[in-house]
Image: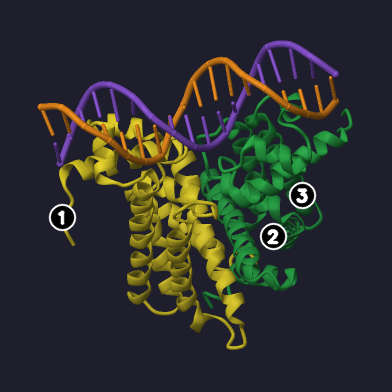
Chain colours: A yellow, B green, C orange, D purple
Amino acid sequence: MPRISPTKMAILSAALELGAVNGISGTTMEQVAERAGVAKGSVYYNFSSKDKLFEELLTTGVSTLAETLSQARQSAAGFAAIEAMVTDMLTLIAENRALAKLMASEIFRTDRAWQDAVQTLRREAISEIGTALAPLVPAATSEPSRLLMAGGIFGATLMGGLEWLLFSPETDVAEVSAAILYTFSGKLAA
Amino acid sequence: MPRISPTKMAILSAALELGAVNGISGTTMEQVAERAGVAKGSVYYNFSSKDKLFEELLTTGVSTLAETLSQARQSAAGFAAIEAMVTDMLTLIAENRALAKLMASEIFRTDRAWQDAVQTLRREAISEIGTALAPLVPAATSEPSRLLMAGGIFGATLMGGLEWLLFSPETDVAEVSAAILYTFSGKLAA
DNA sequence: GTCTATAAATAGATAGAC
DNA sequence: GTCTATCTATTTATAGAC
């Protein structure tokens, strides 16, 4: 892994901040260059296209998420594994809010150059949750059903995390995590 | 409510189909005109701008969703209200897949001309779920926590619905609904 | 109300000097 | 490796005839 030059770093960082606020198609290469403190030519020297630039940002982001979920799953057993995954995912969202916003706005899209890479990693993340669910559901549960449940847990955590960042950012991660997990505890249905 | 002319209808329909496949910024007014079988000038005669066109599509969509959730909530009491909301939301998604895809790809965005309208309606939908949760959570639960839970349930249903449409579209709505609701039943934690 | 033709602006990408 | 200057394509939006 060749280490990243300061210029490349500045460009990625500028693209991330601008993309989180204005969206990707609302961000121009001109703006990225300006914010990174370099000329547009330098941006294109480091990234062959706008698509490649944001693809790098998104794939490393989603890849980190998948890795986080994988480690959380292995850190505990049974339902505690689900609890760890939800909590760690929320922590990750909190630690990298800009990236979380950017990913959330792109994760449902199927019309982008980088869709394949992002969708593959999204499925990886969801099937990581699916694996943790395996011992918790009836043996007869179909694979698609288990992935639907996993998708639901993923969606609940993501939407809860976004709701948190956008509307009650002062709330502690533990409280957010507790709220999301409460819905899976069965106490609602009791 | 002035009734919609056939031309306007054709334009909205074309915009919906194209937007669901290619995304909004990936859809040009030229394409919309062509698909609707009219000239571009006619598109602009009916909608003052591209933003207005998609705003109309999205706000009526999210508004229908909020209305559906409201009715579902009032159709039952206790946890059954949550069950009804999840099921009816999934049914709505199934009945209007193109609109669901379009909404999902825009609902997290905060950079669009129509963001205010869409975000307002999104919050309306979530607080409808929050209302149904009120009698199901401890009295001491804070308002933000309840909204986080509601956001989670909304997110789970949306993501589950999308997972369904994209990866196992042949699955019956009842099975999808059962899978999502299973995660809220408490059986996972048992 | 619908059309054709065109204006006007934007933004991704490249060339070539330093 | 980084810069400035420029090309080129795209696309939103408008003007004005029918």
Q: Secondary structure at mark 2?
A: helix
How far separated are the C-alphas under marks 1 and 3? 52 Å
Q: Amino acid at mark 2?
A: Val
The residue at 42%/73% (across/down) is: A80
Q: On the image, which quarter does residue A118 sit in?
A: bottom left
In the image, which disc is placed on residue A3? 1
Q: Mark 3 highlights which residue?
A: B68
Classify 10 Å Cα crowding around label 3: few (below 14), some (14-19), many (20 and above). Answer: some
Say whether residue A62 is left or right of residue B149.
left
Q: Amino acid at mark 1?
A: Arg
How far separated are the C-alphas under marks 1 and 2? 48 Å
Q: Nearer the viewer, residue B42 or B64?
A: B42
Q: Secondary structure at mark 3?
A: helix
Q: Mark 2 highlights which residue?
A: B86
Q: Which comes before the other along the chain, label 2 or label 3?
A: 3
Q: Nearer the viewer, residue B137 or A181?
A: A181
